[in-house]
Amino acid sequence: MNTNMPAEAGVTHAPDVTIGVPYLRCIGCDADVTAPTEDFACPACGDRLEVAYRPSGAPDPDALKTLWHARKLSAAPTDLSGVWRFREALPILPAASAPVTLREGNTPIYPLARCARSAGVDALLAKHQGMNPTGSFKDTGMTTALTMARVKGFQWVGCASTGNTSASMAAYAAHAGMRALVLIPEGKIAWGKLSQSMDYAASTCQLKTDFDGCVRVLGEVIRRFPLYLLNSVNPYRLEGQKTTAYEMMEQLAWETPDHVIVPGGNLGNSSALGKGFREMLALGLIRKLPRLSIIQARGANPLVRSMKEFSGERIEPVRAETRATAIRIGNPASWKKAVAVLRETGGACEDVSEEEIAAAKAEIGADGVGCEPASAVTLAGLKNLVRSGFVKRGESVVLVLTGHCLKDPEYTMDFHRDAAAADRALRKPPVLLDADPASVIDLLHRMEM
Ligand code: F0G
């Protein structure tokens, strides 16, 4: 049985209720781009592209909400996807083409009680994108972009990655029967992610460079070999990722939170979420935008510097260094889109230290939720934003946790085993005991003290 069959039977939609007819628009010169370069730049001015829509009727926001909700009862694969369930906001596929889906999206929102106390807010929520099929938010954009690769007839897809994009791409390519080329920086990749790429049978190359170097090499490769680029410069990636904002709002009964906080690496995700919120406002699905704040690691903070030193008008690449390897990125592709989101929503852009990231990750873990290091910058950033008064105690805050805690177990082990470090109270190293009940009971008594 083909499990990727179209899911139009049962719960369906009339074409005139979509948000419009898609086209690629240059964010620099506003051109309508029909023939982008292989790396999705505008052939006229070289700037990034986004998927835009020419309105083809005015969708009724309440009807959309009802339709999206009703699809949760459907058994069709396209309805079971937390991305394609919102397909009226995502009308990018030619009629009769079926999405490649692993039932991505549908991720939970958890309360973080302990973290709320330590950050100094009354309540704190986490939208956990690590609960996607390959353990990161990348799946929500991979389903859309990889489906476009198949629609366009490509056999090969490829990406440069710090590990999560490659894990996701490898899985979706394998599921679609396509071939995948992964370029990752040697050494600076978490084992969970590298092992996924191998498990999902991708051709994996570790290059003797960093992420930014991998991007440069792949840029040359795609000019000489027919390979569809699945990095987040591919605007169809961001179209899928924007649905996380839709899903979040549906989960919150369409009441916009005061703040949404995301990690910033290549800046695709912040751009995508901002686009989602902007569209929902225009469609009348929500009444206001949240402040969308972006947090970077201090050793990989080109956007923070751009905002502080150049008011977001230009960016200077940095040599990136952080143990949060997912966001070890010095030359972010989507910085202009991210600056637009910061300006439009009035969000903050801050960086946090390695110590702050490590402590925040352990605190999210101690709430029973857990995440990978890059995701923990959100809590570390929130603490600083509360301290500076940007976030008020009674305001509603959603952290976007981007990756699962099993992605980088080495980081977690190192933290908990480092007995000499600060934050002793957060550290829970395994205790070595004799194999007798008395030793264990003795330990329990000591723990109770
Ligand atoms: N969090 C995680 C877990 C990530 O893997 C990434 C990016 C980010 C945050 C930053 O998101 O790039 O959209 O600003 N990972 C990429 C990769 C670059 O190759 O997996 P961004």
Image (cartoon, grey):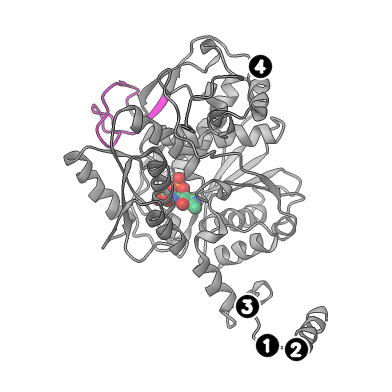
Q: What amino acid is at disc 3?
A: Pro
Name the residue that disc number 4 marks. 63
Q: Secondary structure at mark 2?
A: helix
Q: Earlier in the sequence, mark 2 or mark 3?
A: 3
Q: Nearer the viewer, mark 2 or mark 4?
A: 2
* Residue 439's disc number: 2
Where residue 4 appears, x then y in whole percent? Answer: 47, 31
Left or right of 303, for residue 379: right
Name the residue that disc number 1 marks. 433
* Residue 299's disc number: none
Where 257 falls versus 98 (above or below)?
below
Q: Earlier in the sequence, mark 1 or mark 4?
A: 4
Residue density around tag 1, few if under 14, some if 14–19, many if 20 or more, within 10 Å:
few
Would you say the residues marked 2 and 1 are in contact, meaning their CB atoms lie under 8 Å apart?
Answer: yes
Left or right of 135, for residue 226: left
Q: What amino acid is at disc 2?
A: Ser
Where 178 falls versus 408 (above or below)?
above
Distance in Å between CA atoms under marks 2 and 3:
17 Å
Q: Earlier in the sequence, mark 3 or mark 4?
A: 4
| Residue at screen point 61% across, 77% down | 422
Q: What amino acid is at disc 1?
A: Leu
* Residue 429's disc number: 3
Distance in Å between CA atoms under marks 1 and 4:
61 Å
| Residue at screen point 42% across, 51% down | 167
Q: Earlier in the sequence, mark 2 or mark 4?
A: 4
Distance in Å between CA atoms under marks 3 and 4:
52 Å
Where residue 447 appears, x then y in whole percent? Answer: 78, 80
Is residue 345 in view from this perspective?
no
| Residue at screen point 64% across, 42% down | 259
From which residue to which does the magenta span run? 29-51
Residue density around tag 2, few if under 14, some if 14–19, many if 20 or more, within 10 Å:
few
